[in-house]
Image (cartoon, helix red, strand yellow):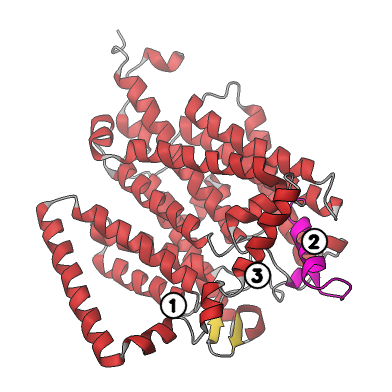
Amino acid sequence: MMQSARRIDDDELTGMRPGKRLSFVNFLKRYPIFLLAFGPPIFRPHGGIDATKGVIDFWAFFQVVFLAAISSRAIFRLMAVESILIPKQIRSILKYAFFLGLLYLASATYSPSRPVSAAYSILYILAWICVAEFLVDAYKNPPDWMQCLFSLRLISLLLLALAFLTLPFKPDMVMSFEPGIGIRIMGGTIAPVGSAASIIAIISAYTFLHSLESKGRSVVLFLVGLAGTLITQSRGAELALFLCLAILFAGWAKTSKRSAYIFISGFMALVLFSGVVIGVAGGGRLWNTFNRGQDAAGIASASGRTDIWKFVIQYCIAHPQGMGYEAGFRVLFRDYVSPGILVVVSMIGNAHNTFLQVLADAGWLALAAYLIMMTKTVALGWRFARKHIAAALAPNRAPLHALRCVLVLLILCFADGMNAADFGLPLRAAFYTQNLIVAIILGISANMIEISRAKKMPAAN
C-alpha cells in the first residue's frame, strides 16, 4: 500500500546492507525464535519420566516455561501489528501448519492420556506462533540471512560442546554402550548430537565451497561436524549426512566448468580410493563395520524399526484417526508388545520415523496435511533458489546462498527423520530446528516475492 509509493531497494528487502550483522547475543535478543533451537538442554537421563501419567519434574516445567516465554512475546508482537501482510503462498503453508495443530488437539479426545496429548498440542501451536511472528517481522525488516545460518551453526556447536562437557560427569545422560556396536554418544535429552553435528558439517561445507567465510574455519568446523556424526554410530545419521553432502557438491559442480572438473576428478579419485580400501580390508569386513556386526535379520528390519512401522500402519488402517498426539503411541505400543506386563512407558520412545509418527499421532488426514505443508515449502524455496530467478530478483547473492543451504538442511531433516521421530515432537531440539529451517525458507521466499512485486512497480514520482 504505502510501501508501493516509493522505490524499494533490493538490499533493504533482503536484509543484506553492509554492517548490519549483529553480535550473537544481540541476534538472539532480536530473533528469540533461535533460542528454541537449544531445546532447551534437559539434564536428566533420557526417558527419565513418564509424561503419560502426568509425572513432571523441574526440567519439564523449565521446558514449558521457556517455550511459553518466547511464544508470549511472539503473541504480543503479533497483536501489536496493525496489519499482517505476508504473501498468500506463505499464508497457505501456515494454514496447513495450524490445521495440523488443530488435528493434534482434536486427537486428545480419543488419546489414552488426554491431558498429555492436549498439552503437547498446545506446545506445537505455540511453536508455530513463534514461526508466524518471525515471518511477519522478517517480511517487514529482513534479517541478515547468512547470519541466520551462522547462528544456527553456532547453536549446534554449543549443543555439541555441552554434550561433551557432560560426558565426564554424567556419561549415562549422553552416552550408551551396546554390544557389537560399542560406545555411542547420542546426546540424550541434552543435545541431538547426530543432527547438530550434521548441521555444522553441512553449513561449513557450503561456506567452504562458495568462499563465504575463512577456509580454515570452514574446514575445522566441517571436520568437527563429521566427527560428531560418526561418534553417534548411527547409520541413519551417517547416510543422511552423506546424501546432503552429495547434493551440495553436485550443486557446486554446476556453478562453473572448473568446479565441474574438480567434482568429476574428485569423484573418480573417491571411486578408486574406495576400490583400494575394499580390496585391502575386504568387502565383508567393511559391510560388518558399517552395520556394527548386526545380523541379516537386524539389518532387514532396520534394527527392529520395521516392526514398529508395521504396527503403526496396521493400527491406523483400522483406526484412521490415529492414536492421540504424543501419548497415544507410547501407551498403545506398550500394550501391543507386552500386554499385561509393567513397562516404563517413557522408555518405549516413539515410532522412529517422523512421517509415521505424524500418522500415529493424528491419522491419515494429519499425514496428508504434513506432507502437503512440507512439499509446498520445498517447492516454494526451490522456485527462488534457481540461479536465473534469484539473479533477476536480487543482485546480492547472499540470500540465494542462504536459501540453497537451508534447503539442504531441510533435506537432512527429512532423511534423518526416516529413522527418528524427534523432528515432529515438541520439547525436542530437533523439532524446533526443523521449524526454524522452514521459517528461514519461508522468510527468504517472502522477501523474494516482495522484490518481484517491487520490480514491477513504477518508480515513485
Q: Which residue is drawn at 47% across and 59% down?
A: 415
Q: How crowded is mark 2: few (under 14 residues within 10 Å), some or many (20 or more)?
A: some
Circle 2 or circle 3, nearest the eye: 2
Q: Type of residue at label 3?
A: Thr
Query: For the magenta stretch, what is the residue range?
Result: 324-347
**Residue 253 quadrant:** bottom left
Is label 2 in contact with label 1 (beta carbons under 8 Å)? no
Q: Mark 3 points at which residue?
A: 189
How far apart are the two marked residues, 2 and 1, measured between alpha carbons? 34 Å
**Residue 8 quadrant:** top left
Circle 2 or circle 1, nearest the eye: 2
Residues 284 and 89: in front is 284
Q: Which residue is drawn at 47% across and 69% down?
A: 237
Q: How crowded is mark 1: few (under 14 residues within 10 Å), some or many (20 or more)?
A: some
Q: Type of residue at label 2?
A: Leu
Q: In this view, does 185 lie above or below 375?
A: below
Mark 2 vs 3, N-terminal side: 3
Q: Name the residue under label 2.
A: 332
Residue 87 position, x and y percent, is 48, 26
Q: Name the residue under label 1.
A: 230
Residues 169 and 89: in front is 89
Q: Inspect this view and state whether residue 35 appears.
A: no
Q: Type of residue at label 1?
A: Leu
